[in-house]
């Protein structure tokens, strides 16, 4: 049982205040959706939690099972059980998907997985996500299509088994079939009840497959409303205007 607790988090980028006091608690077994207009600070929240150097924490706390994550290096955060999928992952020529994943598993577990065992886990994970075997030898993120990036994200989840997963725009750019495969991957993964998922999204589409327990609306760098799955439907029908007006 794990808990990620974000308390009054304030974050600036290049001296510009972006997050203005975010409060959010995610427990293992729960799925939280964060929705909100462009530029409201959703990705900033994900990056700040992950420890991206560009994002300066100016106040508040992020606790994982009571320990302050903000004191930890990026590697240590991953080892503590945090996983972040980026909206725009970086391309790394010369590093294959397979090598990257094995290094990531090694870093998180603190020891290298046995080659044969890793190869089996990798194959099972790729099969489950309908990823072609040749994909493992591709250069990391290089020329990946939108759908390939997202499947790769879910593959990482399955191999790394984090306590808390933050998924930023996992559904963007997916066709209907890929959306289903990726959603099934998330569902398989959260069915263990051991992981808390924070799903950042613009669309209610993915939320039809991955039912959130809680929906939070982000506007102007804070959570302005919270509710259950029905809130997502309301947002789809009504848009964000009522919130953007109020927070401006
Ligand atoms: N590295 C950066 N340098 C400058 N400004 C930034 C940086 N990162 C974020 N910002 C600014 O912070 C604000 C929030 O951006 P953020 O990416 O968090 O929004 P978002 O809610 O994820 O939007 P979207 O829905 O478009 O992905 C924006 O005004 C953005 O321009
Ligand atoms: Mg974003």
Image: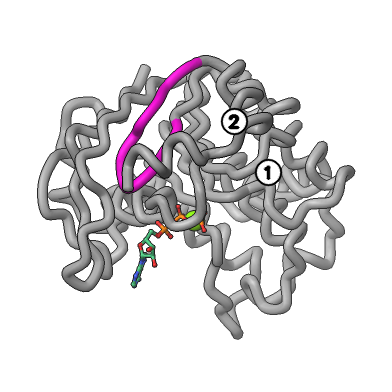
**Residue 87 lies in the magenta stretch:** no
Checking the image for residue 170, the label placed there is none
Q: Name the residue under label 2.
A: 235
Q: How far apart are marks 2 and 1 (CA)?
A: 39 Å
Q: Residue furthest bottom?
A: 94
What secondary structure is found at the residue carrying circle 2? Answer: helix
Q: Name the residue under label 1.
A: 121
**Residue 222 lies in the magenta stretch:** yes
Q: Residues within 10 Å of mark 2 (few under 14, many from 20)?
A: some
Give the quarter of the image for residue 187. top right
Residue 18 picture location, percent across and down: 27, 56
Disc 2, ligand 1: is the CB inside 8 Å?
no
Task: Using residue 228 as the reference point, say whether residue 47 is left or right of it.
Answer: left
Q: Please give the range of residues in magenta.
A: 217-227
Which residue is at 50% across, 55% downward? 38
**In the image shown, does 16 or 162 lie closer to the viewer?**
16
* Quadrant including the N terminus: top left
Residue 101, placed above or below residue 69: below
What secondary structure is found at the residue carrying circle 1? Answer: helix
Residue 87 picture location, percent across and down: 54, 59
The structure's colour scheme is one colour
Residue 193, placed above or below residue 11: above
Can residue 161 be seen at all in this image of the molecule? no
Task: Using residue 197 as the reference point, say whether residue 173 is left or right of it.
Answer: right
């Amino acid at each position: 049982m794990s808990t990620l607790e974000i308390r009054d988090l304030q974050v600036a980028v290049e001296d510009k205040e972006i997050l203005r006091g975010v409060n959010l608690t995610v427990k293992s077994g729960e799925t939280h959706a964060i929705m909100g207009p462009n530029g409201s600070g959703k990705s900033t929240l994900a990056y700040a939690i992950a420890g991206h150097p560009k994002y300066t924490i100016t106040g508040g706390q992020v606790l994982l099972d009571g320990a302050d994550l903000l004191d930890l290096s990026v590697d240590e955060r991953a080892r503590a059980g945090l996983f972040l999928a980026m909206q725009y992952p970086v391309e790394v020529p010369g590093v294959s998907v397979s090598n990257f994943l094995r290094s990531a598993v090694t870093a998180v577990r603190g020891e290298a997985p046995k080659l044969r065992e890793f190869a089996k886990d990798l194959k099972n994970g790729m099969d489950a996500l309908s990823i072609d075997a040749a994909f493992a030898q591709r250069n990391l993120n290089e020329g990946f299509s939108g759908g390939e990036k997202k499947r790769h994200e879910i593959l990482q989840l399955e191999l790394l088994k984090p306590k808390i997963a933050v998924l930023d725009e996992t559904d963007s750019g997916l066709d209907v079939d890929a959306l289903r495969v990726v959603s099934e991957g998330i569902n398989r993964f959260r069915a263990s009840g051991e992981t808390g998922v924070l799903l950042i999204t613009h669309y209610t589409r993915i939320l039809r497959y991955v039912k959130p327990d809680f929906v939070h609306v982000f506007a102007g760098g804070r959570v302005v409303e919270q509710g259950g799955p029905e809130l997502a439907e309301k947002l789809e029908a009504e848009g964000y205007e009522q919130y953007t007006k109020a927070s401006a």
